[in-house]
Amino acid sequence: MRVWYDACTGKQVRYAIAIAKKFRALGHEVIFTTREHPDTIPLAKGLGEDPLVVGKYAPTTLTSRLEESAERIIQFARMFRDKKPDVAIAHQSVELCRVAFGLGIPIITTADTPYAYAVNRLTLPFAHTVVVSEALPKSFTADNGAHNVAVFRGVDEVAWIKGFKTKKTADTKRPLIVVRQIETRAVYAEKKQDNVQTLAQRLAELGNVHVVQRYNNENEEAYKGKLGFEDTAELVAHADLVVSYGGTITREAALQGVPSIGISDMAKTYVNTYLAQKGFPLFATTEDQVIEVAKQYLGKRFDVADKLAALENPVDVIADIAKNITMQK
């Protein structure tokens, strides 16, 4: 079986590597593609992968987004002109979905962001099967034109946190507080204010703050800037607290028993609420209340081994779907 995975973000690179390992172990060929992005190539190389880079992330304007997406579509179409993959897999790569659909390649896509309206409309209707967490309401896939839906017991991050082995790292001044910047260049966060600098300064009164930036920034005086590749799953494993405007890093931390605080309205997602209800240390609050919540949970470790073991790995679900699709050809 020839499997194509296209990863557009750092999270998707994580997913791609977990899926690639599974399919390679089964004896299948994996075509791993990505695009130039602050998180993709450094992360892939840092984890020992060398993906084929096609196109780049260009969020400056709607026109730049559209033009770069169109360029990737053309390049992929040419790439697979003579020899197509048997199945295409992604976490909602718009370009993969358009190309695979146009070339008659069955698509399996994961999805966990109901608020990403544009991406949902440009990916889910093309998919043979949409694989989603049971945390998400049925209306999410139904309203966005999904045809076949496979539901799993867990969240996407289980794919790379389950069985994750941490490495020994250099001693770090304690307590270590990891803070993740908001993804201001994403469409769903375009009108959100980036207050990470102020937040880092406030949290510095409680411990050693390490800011993980989304992008290289010219305003780096008050906190450590983005200097290159950082393995965030490894970083949060050694943290005493994680505070984030996003979702992935909070779930990576909570799944490892590290107290994690999500702030802003984007923290109150279905998947975050799902993990919190299952007893993982994931807490949602506001910027005004974050210090009080941080004081309450800073340095506490939670034993979540049994809870994590009870969750289903979506990679296994995807592998079974791919096998069934190719057998039906």
Image: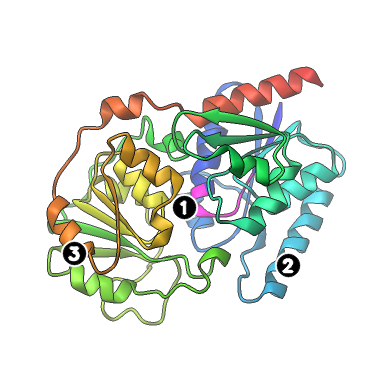
Element assignment for label 1 = helix
The answer to which of marks 2 and 3 sits earlier in the sequence is: 2
The answer to which of marks 2 and 1 sits earlier in the sequence is: 1
Quadrant housing residue 143? top right
What residue is shown with label 3? 291
Image location of residue 282, percent across then percent down? 29, 46
Label 3 amino acid?
Ile
Q: Nearer the viewer, residue 257 or 174?
A: 257
| Residue pictured at 32% horizontal, 34% vertical | 278
In the drawing, does residue 144 fall left or right of residue 242? right
What residue is shown with label 2? 66
Image location of residue 99, percent across then percent down? 79, 48
Element assignment for label 3 = helix
- Residue 156 lies, with reference to residue 311, above or below; the image says below
**Can you tell which of label 3 and label 1 is closer to the viewer?**
3
Which part of the image, by quadrant, shows the N terminus?
top right
The answer to which of marks 3 and 1 sits earlier in the sequence is: 1
What residue is shown with label 1? 43
Q: Nearer the viewer, residue 48 or 138?
A: 138
In the drawing, does residue 261 fall left or right of residue 247? left
Highlighted range, magenta: 6-11
Q: Is residue 156 magenta?
A: no
| Residue pictured at 58% horizontal, 56% vertical | 116
Tag 2 and tag 3, C-beta contact below 8 Å: no
Residue 152 in view: yes
